[in-house]
Amino acid sequence: MFRLSVEVEETAAAVRRRWNRRPKAGVILGTGLGSLTEGIDVEASINYDDLPYFPQTTALSHAGRLICGKLGGVDVVVMEGRFHLYEGYSLDQITLPVRVMRELGAEMLVVSNASGGMNPYYHSGDIMLMEDHINMMWESPLLGHTDEGTPAERFPDMSSPYDRRLLQLAADVARREAIRVHQGVYVAMSGPNYETRAEYRFLRKIGGDVVGMSTVPEVIVARQCGLKVLALSTVTNICLPDDLGRVGKYDVVNAAKAAEPKLRRIVREVIREA
């Protein structure tokens, strides 16, 4: 844990040399959702290359920049591109940015992702507010870490990982803006392959509404660090096992981009009103 603490402190110091403010929120943008940064009054844009200990993103449509500035008049720090287990990174590397955001002073984390919809009532382009998740990555980012010398808990409670007030606020904003949203359960898989018909049937049977390849490690660490969390999942493809078609990576990216304006309105208003 000492090594990780040093990495967090040195990375946060590198950010402060370019942008010395205390963000209210940290934001992580997922596949195809990078243009959400267009609504930010950018005060600093830092390439991941320039941040010590930050990995390099290799996923399609992930720009690899840390954007610092104001969104809706609120100080934010935004990851324009995240890291995934399927890229070969460790869970410590994937979740390092969350710890850095907390070190910078963030009080809440807003996470977005692209997902496959298993709930038959969901359609491509819909947004699901994550009210719970199922971790099928089979590993926790907290393994091996103690809480010595840190404010983080060794055994964080996960009975309610997604902040109820933020969920309600997001639902209220969506209703006000006439945006179709659902609330449901996200299943996290390691990827990078998509699931089989049998796997979709199983994941739906155990309670999953959508499935994706990210987010849950970051949420676990955010809760360990005491951050309030809101997570929004854009349904980019439909995963009904009895009517399953081939999915290409560009199909996912394009569907996510088409939903960006709706997601941008929700995220901006939630951060502003929270």
Image: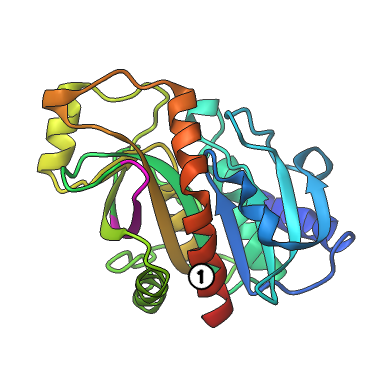
Q: Is residue 5 above or below residue 205?
A: below
Span highlighted in magenta in the image: 124-132
Q: Residue at x 48, y 52 (%)?
A: 112
Q: Residue at x 69, y 33 (%)?
A: 56
Q: Is residue 3 or residue 39 the one in the foreground?
A: 39
What amino acid is labelled 1 in the image?
Answer: Leu
Residue 119 in the image: state x and y as whole percent. 18, 44
Mark 1 Cα within 10 Å, few/some/many (few <14, many 20+)? many
- Res 210 quadrant in image: top left
* Mark 1, residue position: 227
Q: Is residue 98 or residue 63 the one in the foreground?
A: 63
Give yes or no for residue 128 being in the magenta stretch. Answer: yes
Left or right, residue 154 beside residue 15: left
- Res 202 quadrant in image: top left
Q: Main secondary structure of the magenta part?
A: strand
Number of dots carrying numbers: 1
